[in-house]
Image (cartoon, grey):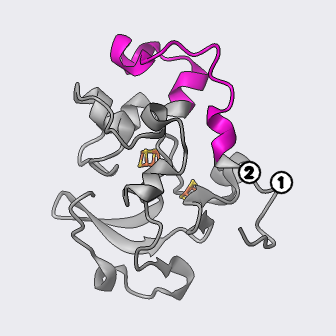
C-alpha cells in the first residue's frame, strides 16, 4: 500500500479486524437485529467492499452510481485512507447508521452487509465474518479492487461516469 500525504496513521492491516474474535458471539448477525449490535459487532459487519465510497448522483428520485471514487479511498485495499478524520475532511462522507441504511432512495450498494441484514437476509458466503479473512471480499470480486475506477479529482461531469454494475 503506497503511503502519501493523506495518511494520518501507520498503514492498517485489515486482517487485524478478525484476529481477536474471542469475545464475539458466533453468527451474532443472525441472532440480533442491527439496533442491538454493539460497536465492535457493528464495525465487523462492514465487508470492506469500498462501494459506498463511489460518487453517486440522484436522478429522478433514483441513485445512480458512478465509477468515480472519493479521493481518500485506497483502491487497492478499498479502505479509507483517513478513516478517523473522514467526517472532518469530507463534507459528504456519510456515517453508516440505521437511518442511513434505510434512507430512500438507497445509496448503499445492494451487497452492503448492513442492507442485507436489514432486509432479513444472511451475509454472503464470501463475507469476512464467514471466511475469517478480510481479503475474501476481494477474492470474490465483490469489492472495488481491480475495477476500472476514476479518481474524483480528474472528473468534470459525473454524468459521464454512471455505471450499472449488477452488484450496486
Ligand atoms: S458498502 Fe457497506 S459493506 Fe461495503 S464498505 Fe460500505 S459500509 Fe462496508
Ligand atoms: S472519506 Fe468517506 S467517502 Fe472518502 S474514502 Fe473515506 S470513508 Fe470513503
Asked whether mark 2 lies closer than 8 Å to ligand 2, one says no
Query: Which residue, given by chain and number where applicable, does mark 1 sit on?
Result: 9
Q: How much space separates mark 1 and mark 2, taking CA atoms?
A: 8 Å
Task: Tell me if mark 1 has few (under 14), some (14-19) or many (20+) residues whose alpha carbon lies within 10 angstroms of its own.
Answer: few
Question: Residue 108 at x, y = what percent?
Answer: 34, 49
Query: For residue 147, which numbered disc appears in the image?
Result: none
Q: Is residue 117 magenta?
A: no
Query: For residue 12, which numbered disc appears in the image?
Result: 2
Of 90 and 36, the residue lying toward us: 36
Residue found 48% across the figure and 59% down from its top: 53
Residue occupying the far left of the picture: 60
Magenta range is 15-43
Q: Is residue 21 magenta?
A: yes
Mark 1 touching mark 2, by CB under 8 A?
A: yes
> Which of the 4 quarters of the picture holds residue 162?
bottom left
Of 11 and 52, the residue lying toward us: 11
Residue found 62% across the figure and 33% down from its top: 18
Count of labels shown? Answer: 2
SS for callout 2 = loop
Of 163 and 59, the residue lying toward us: 163
Which of the image's four quarters has the N terminus?
bottom right
Question: Residue 74 at x, y = what percent?
Answer: 61, 66
Question: Residue 14 at x, y = what percent?
Answer: 64, 47
SS for callout 1 = loop
Residue found 48% across the figure and 70% down from its top: 69
Q: Is residue 157 above or below residue 20?
A: below
Amino acid at each position: 500500500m503506497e503511503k502519501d500525504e493523506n495518511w494520518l496513521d501507520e498503514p492498517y492491516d485489515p486482517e487485524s479486524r478478525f484476529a481477536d474474535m474471542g469475545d464475539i458471539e458466533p453468527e451474532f448477525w443472525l441472532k440480533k437485529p442491527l439496533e442491538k449490535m454493539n460497536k465492535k459487532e457493528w464495525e465487523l459487519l462492514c465487508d470492506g467492499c469500498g462501494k459506498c465510497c463511489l460518487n453517486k448522483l440522484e436522478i429522478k428520485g433514483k441513485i445512480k452510481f458512478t465509477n468515480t471514487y472519493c479521493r481518500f479511498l485506497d483502491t487497492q485495499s478499498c479502505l479509507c485512507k483517513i478513516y478517523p478524520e473522514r467526517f472532518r475532511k469530507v463534507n459528504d462522507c456519510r456515517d453508516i447508521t440505521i437511518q442511513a441504511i434505510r434512507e430512500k432512495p438507497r445509496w448503499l450498494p445492494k451487497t452492503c452487509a448492513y442492507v442485507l441484514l436489514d432486509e432479513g437476509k444472511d451475509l454472503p458466503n464470501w463475507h469476512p465474518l464467514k471466511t475469517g479473512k478480510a481479503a475474501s471480499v476481494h477474492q470474490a470480486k465483490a469489492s472495488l479492487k481491480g475495477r476500472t475506477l476514476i479518481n474524483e479529482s480528474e472528473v468534470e461531469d459525473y454524468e459521464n461516469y454512471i455505471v450499472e454494475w449488477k452488484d450496486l
